[in-house]
Image: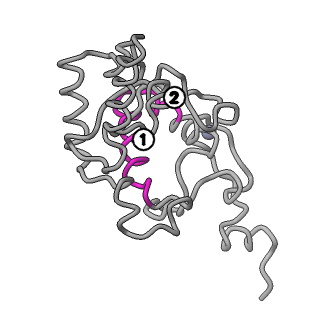
Amino acid sequence: MTLSPNLNNVLTNLDLPKKCFGCKIVYQNIVENFFVRKKSKDGYSSKCKKCEIQKGIEYARTEIGYLTVCYSSIKNRYKNVRYRSLSEKEKEPHRCNITKKEFFELWEEHKKNFGYRCRLTEIKIILERAVDNKKRRFAGYSNAMSVDRLNPLIGYTKENIIFVSNEANKIKSGVTKDICIKVLKLYEEKGL
Ligand SMILES: [Zn+2]
């Protein structure tokens, strides 16, 4: 028996029209327009790719969403390509040694003590990502919250994490305690 092209499509499930639960648009091609979701009935998300991406952007703009993205980026940092060739010891300063729960608690503590302020510059910080990711690929808003390590030579621990602005993080960069002391001495020496 030969199947009609339509029935064939039904069986392979590749070209079935599927309605997005979000925008209600009916798509002809599931594979192209929906993300794979193994747990769902037909194996695809109930919302189309466009709606899912929008949902992700909106979530990242909430405080919990922003913090979740911050945490997963520090958690996965040492896996980054640029650290791949490093030894385990060399990777240590990039490692995250706290749980997500501890990370959220640290932020709550920061808020209680310092409010929405950068720990270094004390400017007001926001928990929001730049939406135009292409233009701001490497950095978000300069006043957006950033997770920094006080001592860049050790990893992300409860004691070492400070919440600063993106700009302060960039300025401080890899500055160590030794360098800070030397800079202060130079200021004194030169009477500046
Ligand atoms: Zn949609």
User: What residue occupies the far front of the structure in this picture?
Assistant: 189
Color theme of the render = one colour
Q: Quadrant of residue 180?
A: top left
Of residues 2 and 91, which is closer to you in this image? 91
**x, y percentage for residue 43?**
53, 63
* Residue 10 place in picture, x, y as percent: 68, 68
- Graded by Cα atoms within 10 Å as few (under 14), some (14 to 19) or many (20 or more), the crowding at tag 1 reads some
Circle 1: residue type: Val
Q: Which residue is mark 2?
A: 129
User: Which residue range is magenta in the image?
Assistant: 57-78
Q: Is residue 77 left or right of residue 14?
A: left
Which residue appears farthest toward the bottom when viewing the image?
1
CA distance separating discs 2 and 1: 10 Å
Given contact means CB atoms under 8 Å apart, are the residues at marks 2 and 1 in contact? yes
Q: Residue 138, percent across and down?
A: 60, 38
Q: Residue at x 51, y 66 (%)?
A: 84
Ligand 1 lies in quarter: top right
Q: Is residue 81 magenta?
A: no
Tell whether 32 sits left or right of 95. Answer: right
Is residue 26 toward the left or the right of residue 67 in the image?
right
Judging from the image, what secondary structure is the residue with disc 2 in? loop
51 or 4, which lies in front?
A: 51
Residue at point 54%, 23% (across, down)? 141
- Dividing the picture into quadrants, the one containing residue 114 is top left
Name the residue that disc number 1 marks. Answer: 69
The answer to which of marks 2 and 1 sits earlier in the sequence is: 1
Residue 168 horizontal/vertical position (percent)? 44, 25
Residue 60 painted magenta: yes
